[in-house]
Amino acid sequence: MKPTMRSLAGLAGLLLLASCQDNQQDAQHAPREKGQVFHWKMVTTWPPDFPIFQEGAEKFASDLRLMSDGRLQIQVYAGGELVPPLQVFDAVSAGTVEMGHGASYYWAGKVPAAQFFSAVPFGMDAHGMQAWLTAGGGLELWREIYAPFQVRPFPMGNTGTQMGGWFNKELHGLEDLRGLRMRIPGLGGKVLAEAGGNPVLMSGAELYTALERGIIDATEWVSPFHDLRLGLNDAAEYYYYPGWHEPGTEFELIIHDNAWQQLPRDLQRMVETAATATGVWIRAQMDVHNREALAGLLQQDKVKLRRFPEEMLNELYRVTTRTLNETAARDKDFQRVYQAYDTFRQGLRAWRELGEDAYREARSTARRKHSNEDNS
Ligand code: CA
């Protein structure tokens, strides 16, 4: 029998209905096979709707829902929605929630050695952190440091090298940092204090008003894309680079030990794989958005883009080494991680000087030479 138009329309309708039901099933993430369904909570240190960072955590959860066919369902809460941003580690450690996303330098007060797994002034960039954490022994060490807290860390994202920050005055030398009230977290803040400045801790939401009203003289935040979203370009004139204090800040996914052990092996592997994929996504988003934001920023006459004076950077480097050594002398774990980090960094430096560094230098020299020829 030849199909009539009416029966074809009927068939199309049935197919449409079936696909709607599929979609509904996807939307509810109902498991299609028998098996345990895990309903987990994830808290983050990021503001609600914060682009790239909070967005990345939410993408991670929705990818896992899909990959696990609904067997692992993670409800994501931004900073302050379930627990305050700086209590994410405690909430995961206590098992109040199963998961968290943030950066390990936020827990410096509790675990000073944790800072090596986020950002070290004049330390490794995103590229180096990835090598150390993925294949250079860094992750094993990180897990040892977090083990007493029943927390299991995974790398999940990196900001790339940040900007040095917004200042309400021009900087000529180290003496300009004396008495400077600057929002700068982690080891960078410690180094600023050693150099005579006054590091201040405040959340991103407070920065614009504090800088604009002169409660602080300077602030660092992230890089052009996130800085412009806070309007920091309207609060101070001078925008300094490079971000010596955060050369490539790594983000962490943290999971409570018992929750992790309850997951079947296939779901564990999905979590690891999704964390890696989300990390790549975050890193790429940073470059794509900063590229666009910088182009817009360069067109604003009122923003004065400046490189930190070379002598100041040299001095900050010296103060950084002293600060790290002094902290290591007081804290055994800090000492142990510092040693491993530094050994890896030195070996990597020797290799990279012949590879990427030499290539970049050669390319800059060649480009300058040819652009001079083009201009002459
Ligand atoms: Ca920062």
Image (cartoon, grey):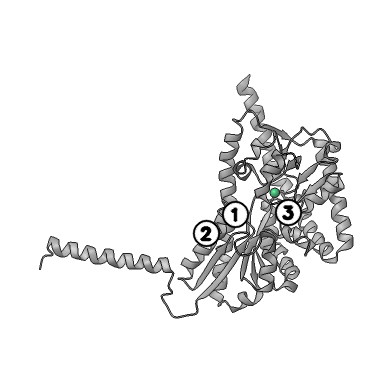
Crowding near the residue tagged with mark 3, few <14, some 14–19, many ≥20 C-alpha atoms within 10 Å: many
Q: Secondary structure at mark 3?
A: loop
Of the two numbered discs 1 and 3 in the rendering, the one whose residue sits closer to the viewer: 1
Residue 353 screen position, x and y as percent: 74, 46
State which quadrant residue 370 falls in. Answer: top right
State which quadrant residue 131 falls in. Answer: bottom right
Residue situated in front as seen by the camera: 102 or 276: 102
Residue furthest toward the top?
376
Q: Earlier in the sequence, mark 3 or mark 2?
A: 2
Residue situated in front as seen by the camera: 66 or 199: 199
Crowding near the residue tagged with mark 2, few <14, some 14–19, many ≥20 C-alpha atoms within 10 Å: some
| Residue denoted by label 3 | 119
Mark 1–mark 2 Cα distance, whole angstroms, equals: 10 Å
| Residue denoted by label 2 | 59
For badge 2, the amino acid type reads Lys
Q: Residue at x 28, y 66 (%)?
A: 17
Against 190, residue 177 (above or below) is above
Whether residues under marks 3 and 2 lie with C-beta atoms below 8 angstroms apart, the answer is no
Of the two numbered discs 3 and 2 in the rendering, the one whose residue sits closer to the viewer: 2
Q: Secondary structure at mark 1?
A: helix
Residue furthest toward the left?
1
Whether residues under marks 1 and 3 lie with C-beta atoms below 8 angstroms apart, the answer is no
For badge 3, the amino acid type reads Ala
Q: Earlier in the sequence, mark 1 or mark 2?
A: 1
Q: Is mark 3 within 8 Å of ligand 1?
A: yes
Q: Is residue 341 left or right of residue 261?
A: right
Quarter of the picture holding the C terminus: top right
Crowding near the residue tagged with mark 1, few <14, some 14–19, many ≥20 C-alpha atoms within 10 Å: many
| Residue denoted by label 1 | 53
Q: Residue at x 14, y 62 (%)?
A: 6
For badge 1, the amino acid type reads Phe
Q: Residue at x 62, y 70 (%)?
A: 97
